[in-house]
Image: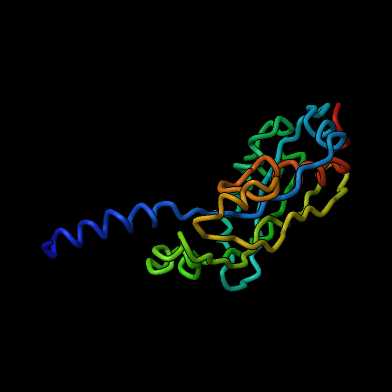
Amino acid sequence: MTIRRMVTLRCALVLPLAASACFSGPLLPRLPAKELASIERPLGSPQAVHLQCVQSGTEFELRCQQAVAEVAKLLALSSWFTTLEASPEDASLVITIYAPLRRPYWSKPAHNPGFLLLSPVVPFWWSEPFGYRMSARLTASGAAVDINTTREGTSVMWGGAFLLNLSPNRSFLPHPERELHQILAQLLPLVGGPG
């Protein structure tokens, strides 16, 4: 057998194994049915929202522009808001986002090709922060509420991670609707509940 043929054969065996490496990430728990029903109904008067951001200068903080874009993408899934780009003067609700911490991609095992090649048979896990911390304030009354969906979660990269994803609180892909539901549930007392 020639060296070229041996290399081709080994690549043909190793690459599918590497490609089968799977990921499992934590999800927020589902809301109870009663709470879910209350946030899925439209508001009596949808809110015009102004999103703003505050940075603390902590290492590995998301840039404000990116944090606002992520939260806007989440909130856009809801019918509670007429706009997410209202000026501060025209907004009925001002949401201040505290720039979240995110683990840099280069510090995760998935960034290392050696770990990627080993992950089909050797599990790798790491802890990372998820979620958002915000405050929301009604401009008319000045009433405010804090919103916090932050959590520390364990991500797993392993060929058998699909077994972990059978759990209702883990998944290969993020579930933005769960994050949105948690945000809306915490925002509900401020905006007066469904109409």
Find residue 53 and report its horizontal and vertical position in percent: 65, 56
Q: Kindly give the residue lying farthest to the left in the view shown.
A: 2
- In the picture, which quadrant includes the C terminus? top right
Instruction: State the residue at coordinates (45%, 68%).
Output: 106
- The residue lying toward the viewer, choosing from 93 and 167, is 167
Q: Is residue 151 above or below residue 184?
A: below
Left or right of residue 123: residue 165:
right
Instruction: State the residue at coordinates (58%, 73%).
Output: 59
Q: Is residue 81 above or below residue 10?
A: above
Find residue 121 and report its horizontal and vertical position in percent: 47, 62
Quadrant housing residue 57:
bottom right
Q: Is residue 171 above or below residue 151?
A: above
Find residue 105 and report its horizontal and vertical position in percent: 48, 64
The number of discs equals 0
Find residue 166 and report its horizontal and vertical position in percent: 64, 46
Q: Kindly give the residue lying farthest to the front in the view shown.
A: 1
Instruction: State the residue at coordinates (71%, 60%).
Output: 151
Quadrant housing residue 79:
top right
Q: Is residue 122 above or below residue 96?
A: below
- In the picture, which quadrant includes the N terminus? bottom left
Q: What colour scheme has been applied to the protein in the rendered image?
A: rainbow
- The residue lying toward the viewer, choosing from 70 and 109, is 109
